[in-house]
Image (cartoon, rainbow, N blue to C red):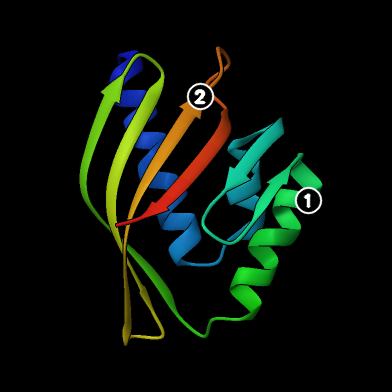
Amino acid sequence: MNKDNNLKKKVDLYFDYFSNKKIEPLISLFSDNILLRDWEIEESGKSDVKKAFENIFKNTEKIKVNSLNNSLIGSRVYCEIDIIINEKELLKVVDIIDFNKDGLIYSIKAFKG
């Protein structure tokens, strides 16, 4: 599998783990110095990012990510997604996900829109 397909596959795994609230597999995709930033939070480091995801999962009964479009440039994947919360609230989001040379996610920036 080439690098491009591998990174896109990891993004698909990330969204699957997120949608299914699988915290340990999710965290295994991250580098130690991961940065998570969205319109409400900014956390860095694996343990703080893990806590942020645990908080998101605790505060939502159901969460589902539908990937609409992914584009890869270098080791950055731009993802247009719909996030459906509790089967009723729809968030339209763009994620920018950066990978390090080891194929681990070191930055996730999420933007509403």
Up-down relation of residue 94 to residue 74 (above or below): below
- Residue most toward the left? 68
**Under tag 2, what secondary structure?**
strand
Name the residue at 68% across, 66% down.
Answer: 54
- Of the image marks 1 and 2, the number of the one nearer the N terminus: 1
Question: What is the three-letter code of the residue carrying label 2?
Answer: Phe
Distance between mark 1 and mark 2 Cα atoms = 19 Å
How far from the left and from the top, in percent, is residue 70? 24, 38
Which quadrant of the rendered structure holds the C terminus?
Answer: bottom left
Check disc 2 and report the residue beneath it.
99
Dot 1: within a 10 Å radius of its alpha carbon, few (fewer than 14), some, or many (20 or more) residues? some
Check disc 1 and report the residue beneath it.
48
Name the residue at 41% across, 85% down.
Answer: 86
Which quadrant of the rendered structure holds the N terminus?
Answer: top left
Q: In the visual, does 107 lie left or right of 113?
A: right
Q: In the visual, does 70 lie left or right of 107?
A: left
